[in-house]
Image (cartoon, rainbow, N blue to C red):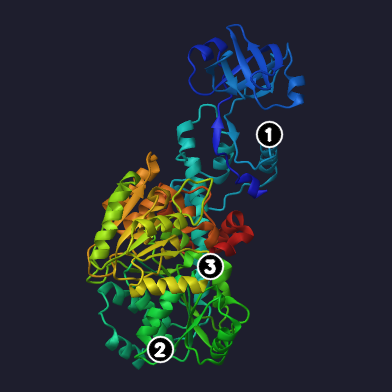
């Protein structure tokens, strides 16, 4: 029942007034409702089959045109019948007409509604009439008691739940339609606050429940760590050290750490995670690092292996494309405990993988994994009584409002500065018609000993999207760049082929790498100083920023060229303008959130995160703060009868779905 009640209108139609037909024809201005008697009705076949219905009142006539219609409508819409029709009048071949109006049959005495008519989100095959009937039944049969006490509502200056919900389903004719459509009406504010409060309560309660669970405390930062630092070819930045200190403190605790390490592209999250891993290894436990793609996982493996050589900690590598002969000894080493640090892809969560003593899990680009996948790795801990600590990393900075809502159950560490020596990347927008100039830039870069990325959005020909694809671009560049070695990398290549191409690019044997977005994260080639992104207008902001982050990793000045095709839409122009103006990942992430919304920003399908239905992270910052503060007061018992309020509120809003917010 509550699901029906909380299925709220997306907009409203004003059927409380009738416009004279003469007025509707003379001054067409958006949607109107007319009422009259059918004068004529016929099916015509020129230029195609359509139903034309002429309706008249005392002031004039108008034509209703139906291009798609049923036989039952032909029988219903006959001369002499009276109807009310709603739609947008416009000039047409048959005079002023309304195409496909919403209508209903009436009599002369049928009263006009006294309320605005709600229009609900609907799946195909479910009519508005059916939805309204079910929702009204639910409103009549369900108790709409308030989950929050009146004293709290007065403090928060919010209306009651029943008053708000009934108003949103049945607003009066004189209601503020603008406030309703913008969801700024007090009734909407109450519903959005309730939704945010439920989410805050659920996630904060999950954090408190985690404090009751047990994890192995890693009390020692041993000799491995000092050896690691002594042989590291650079010093940690202040931001890296601060993040590491926060993680180390959590790892000393006896309940499982659940921390998000976020930082801009190239800020040095990997070295921080490696140092944290050593704390677990020094305490006698195994560490697993899982990345979403083989390229990214292998980059981690190669880099961390190099760092760990002087320390004497062997790093194991596991991926799904390994043959049985390769996998077997690795699986045995993991099961026996000989492998202390294991880097891999989704292969780490397969049933055949058994850890001897897994105490620490690191998940890179965590939003690319589903809830179930993250849980499966965490549950690989060998002791049912002890859960592994968990560190999640993201190169996409999380805006404040998003962190407060979808990551409220996590502790967050931020690396907000780049290591010294990183050169800012200059970004330029270039019309696709200037492609020859870009080819010239590539020649110039190659003559200086520099390497180049050329990124394309598609792998093969697509009839649906006329985009330059990687295969075709590779062929063209091979011809245009005679004397240079042009490589190709895309997601459909076999792992061994990808590995060979990346190895050749890293060693300098490939001068220009044509690739799809498989190189979006993790690829580190300091000698690459020029990035060309084909059809940049088709990419999201965060993805463009990630791709741009593949250059500027060495000491040479680096450039990112965004190739675009005209005409540019408003959103595309806005995206590309932001990329040209700033390299600040946090600002870019905030803009991306505003443009795309939280679902797309987080990758909702991959992450398993349940998106907010009503609240808007950009517009409702004040409500988020109110909900967070209220949740804290309730969970700490600062308000009377807190426990029953929490239970009633979560039961109404989340019912049995709470677990989706807690991972």
Q: Is residue 99 left or right of residue 261?
A: right
**N-terminal of the two: label 3 or label 2?**
2
Q: Where is residue 34 in the image (x, y as percent from the top left)?
A: 59, 17
State the CA–CA distance, disc 3 to disc 1: 39 Å
Residue shown at the point (50%, 30%) measured from the top left = 175
Residue shown at the point (33%, 72%) measured from the top left = 508
Q: Is residue 500 left or right of residue 112?
A: left
Badge 2, how many Cα within 10 Å: few under 14, some, many 20+?
some
Q: Is mark 1 on a helix, strand or loop?
A: helix
State the CA–CA distance, disc 2 to disc 1: 64 Å
Residue 661, quarter of the rendered image:
bottom right
Q: Where is residue 529 in the image (x, y as percent from the top left)?
A: 28, 64
Identify residue for label 1.
129
State the CA–CA distance, disc 3 to disc 2: 26 Å
Q: Is residue 512 shown above or below 268?
A: above
Q: Is mark 2 on a helix, strand or loop?
A: loop
Badge 1, how many Cα within 10 Å: few under 14, some, many 20+?
few
User: Which label belongs to residue 237?
Assistant: none
**N-terminal of the two: label 2 or label 1?**
1
Q: Where is residue 366 in the image (x, y as percent from the top left)?
A: 47, 67
Residue 622 seen in render: no
User: Which label belongs to residue 663?
Assistant: 3
Q: Where is residue 394 in the image (x, y as percent from the top left)?
A: 41, 67
Identify residue for label 2.
219
**N-terminal of the two: label 3 or label 1?**
1
**Depth check, front residue: 153 or 22:** 22
**Depth check, front residue: 436 or 602:** 436
Q: Is residue 24 shown above or below 486?
A: above
Q: Are marks 3 and 1 in contact (CB under 8 Å)?
A: no
């Amino acid at each position: 029942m509550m699901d029906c009640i909380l299925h709220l209108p997306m907009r409203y139609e004003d059927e409380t007034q009738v416009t004279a037909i003469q007025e509707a024809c003379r001054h067409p201005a958006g949607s109107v409702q007319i009422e009259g008697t059918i004068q004529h009705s016929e099916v015509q076949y020129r230029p195609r089959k359509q139903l034309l219905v002429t309706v008249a009142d005392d002031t004039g006539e108008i034509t209703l045109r139906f291009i798609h219609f049923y036989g039952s409508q032909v029988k219903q819409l006959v001369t002499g019948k009276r109807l009310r029709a709603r739609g947008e009048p416009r000039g047409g071949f048959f005079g002023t007409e309304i195409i496909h109006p919403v209508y209903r049959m009436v009599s002369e005495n049928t009263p006009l509604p006294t309320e605005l008519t709600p229009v609900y989100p609907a799946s195909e095959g479910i009519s508005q009439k059916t939805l309204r009937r079910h929702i009204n039944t639910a409103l009549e049969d369900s108790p709409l008691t308030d989950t929050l006490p009146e004293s709290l509502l007065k403090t928060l200056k919010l209306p009651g739940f029943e008053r708000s919900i009934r108003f949103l389903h049945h607003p009066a004719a004189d209601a503020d339609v603008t406030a309703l459509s913008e969801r700024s009406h007090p009734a909407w504010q109450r519903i959005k606050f309730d939704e945010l409060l439920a989410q805050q309560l659920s996630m904060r309660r999950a954090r408190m429940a985690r404090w009751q669970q047990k994890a192995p405390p890693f009390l020692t930062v041993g000799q491995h760590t000092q050896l690691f630092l002594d042989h590291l070819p650079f010093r940690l930045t202040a931001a890296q050290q601060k993040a590491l200190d926060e993680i180390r403190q959590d790892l000393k605790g006896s309940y499982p750490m659940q921390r998000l390490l976020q930082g801009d592209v190239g800020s040095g999250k990997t070295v921080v995670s490696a140092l944290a891993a050593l704390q677990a290894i020094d305490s006698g436990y195994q560490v697993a690092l899982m990345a979403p793609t083989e390229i990214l996982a292998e980059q981690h493996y190669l880099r961390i292996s190099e760092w760990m050589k002087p320390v004497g900690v062997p790093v194991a590598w596991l991926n799904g494309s390994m043959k049985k002969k390769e996998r077997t000894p690795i699986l045995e080493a993991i099961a026996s405990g000989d492998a202390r640090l294991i880097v891999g892809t989704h292969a780490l969560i397969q049933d055949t993988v058994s850890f001897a003593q897994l105490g620490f899990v690191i998940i890179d680009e965590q939003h690319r994994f589903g809830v179930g996948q993250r849980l499966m790795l965490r549950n690989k801990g060998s002791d049912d009584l002890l859960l592994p600590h968990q560190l999640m990393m993201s190169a996409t900075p999380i805006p404040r409002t998003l962190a407060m809502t979808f990551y409220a159950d996590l502790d967050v560490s931020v690396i907000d500065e780049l290591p010294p020596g990183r050169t800012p990347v200059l970004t330029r927008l270039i019309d696709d018609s200037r492609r020859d100039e870009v080819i010239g830039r590539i020649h110039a870069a190659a003559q200086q000993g520099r390497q180049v990325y050329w990124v394309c959005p598609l792998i093969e020909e697509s009839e649906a999207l006329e985009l330059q694809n990687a295969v075709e671009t590779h062929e063209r560049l091979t011809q245009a760049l005679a004397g240079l070695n042009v490589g190709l990398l895309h997601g459909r290549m076999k792992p061994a082929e990808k590995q060979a191409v990346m190895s050749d690019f890293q060693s300098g044997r490939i001068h220009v790498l044509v690739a799809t977005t498989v190189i979006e994260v993790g690829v580190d080639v300091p000698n690459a100083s020029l990035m060309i992104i084909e059809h940049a207008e088709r990419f999201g902001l965060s993805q463009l920023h990630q791709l741009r982050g593949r250059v500027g990793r060495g000491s040479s000045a680096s450039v990112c060229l965004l190739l675009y095709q005209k005409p540019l839409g408003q959103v595309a122009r806005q995206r590309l303008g932001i990329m040209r103006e700033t390299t600040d990942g946090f600002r870019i992430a905030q803009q991306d959130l505003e443009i795309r919304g939280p679902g797309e920003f987080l990758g909702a399908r991959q992450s398993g995160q349940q998106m907010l239905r009503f609240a808007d992270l950009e517009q409702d910052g004040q409500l988020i703060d109110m909900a967070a503060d209220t949740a804290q007061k309730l969970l700490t018992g600062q308000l009377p009868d807190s426990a029953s309020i929490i239970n009633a509120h979560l039961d109404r809003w989340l019912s049995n779905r709470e677990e989706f917010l807690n991972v």
